[in-house]
Image (cartoon, grey):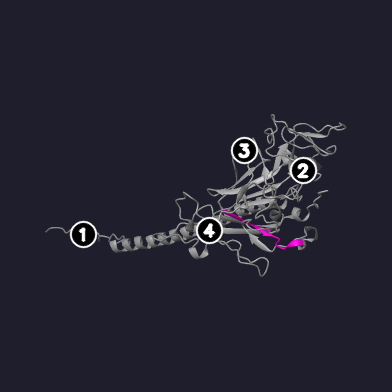
Amino acid sequence: MSRLTSFPALRLQRGFSIVELMISVVIGMMALLFATRMITSSEQGRQAALGGSDSMQNGMMAMFSISNDANQAGFGLNDPILAGCNTSLTDSGGYALAAASRNGTAVTPLAPAVIVDGGLNSDVISINSGGALAGTATVRLTGNYTGGTALEVDREPFGFDAGDVIVVAPEKPNPASALCTLRQLSVKPPFGAAAKSLNFASGTGFRYNSGDMPASYDGGGARVFNLGPAAKLSFHTWSVENGYLKLRATDIPGTGANAAAVADNIVSIKAMYGLDTRAGIAFDPEKGTKVGKWSARMNEDLDGDGVVGGSGDYQRVVALRLAVVARSKAPERPLPGQACNATPDAKRPVVFAAIEPAGGADVSITPNVVIAGDAVDWKCYHYRVFETIIPIRNSAWRPTAWTK
């Protein structure tokens, strides 16, 4: 009789079925997708916040730099004989005065501010001031100047020193053809000498001297103004190039001809003259000034002398209206398959939208914010607009013209 061998009951081996495994994978993928979207959204928010911070910082820096210049505009240049005069400047450092139009002819006015209007594109803004600590010393020519590097003057030139920048200006009311000339004193004027003179010989260290002056001046009919040491002559030109705010300056070494970058991600600067349009004796800066209109161009005969954009018209500039448009440093990434909409067409930045003063004309501008050569659509960036109005204090504080 055979013996039956018994085996213990086999234990069932259990695990994940294919269905359960697939469900787990789907749940995991959904969780990963949700987490990815959260991280992406958080990163987009972070980039937008950082972009807003970048544009705020850069825009404020740009506005502070330009407005700080504007606060000093016209110091030493506010005498009615000198202000706005078409001026010849020769600079071995490469700086050139801004060009403007006077009765249809190109001139280079020595004015507190000169705007080269860019239309919808960025403007070029020149802001000028002297550096004489004791104000602007002045003397009168006694001998006719027809050439050479010396000027005969009516008294001992107190306050003049070697290296100072001088401007010779006709004393009569400046017609459209009048020319002022800027030079630099090459020696300290002698005191006690029978003949009082100022010398501007060319040589190393005298960057504004180039020999004879380009105009003749009558003895008793021209004045010499001292703008102070050359190192403190503040002729500044602000512009925007490839997203950078740039500065050319006479008082910063190496920036006369080649502009230096001041702030990045600046896409436009705009400016307007605040013009006192009151006629005749109603315009009296000693009793206060008043902005009658804003204009990006000097294209009117405001003082009624028959010259459009004349020196008297530049003396009607009593304020500057400034705007800076800054953009975020990093572009915002659009959703897959969609175009950028960080700044849609309907929300393009607008400058000078507020009407100042109340009841005035609308001078708002929608500036071009596209940077040439940028492969990224301009709509992918966020933009901020900064604006201010700066009174030209030295216009109101000008001396009364002395012509006797």
- The residue closer to the viewer here, 354 or 342, is 354
User: As displayed, is residue 175 above or below residue 185?
Assistant: below
Which callout, 4 or 3, points to the residue nearer the camera? 3
Disc with the residue nearer the chain's start (2 vs 1): 1
The residue labelled by disc 4 is: 382
Spatial separation of the CA atoms under disc 2 and disc 1 = 134 Å
Which callout, 3 or 2, points to the residue nearer the camera? 2
Query: What span is colored magenta in the figure?
Result: 268-280
What SS does tag 2 mark?
strand
Q: Are marks 4 and 3 in contact (CB under 8 Å)?
A: no
The residue labelled by disc 1 is: 6
Spatial separation of the CA atoms under disc 2 and disc 4 = 54 Å
The residue labelled by disc 2 is: 222
- The residue closer to the viewer here, 246 or 292, is 292
The residue labelled by disc 3 is: 94
Q: Quadrant of residue 26?
A: bottom left
What SS does tag 1 mark?
loop
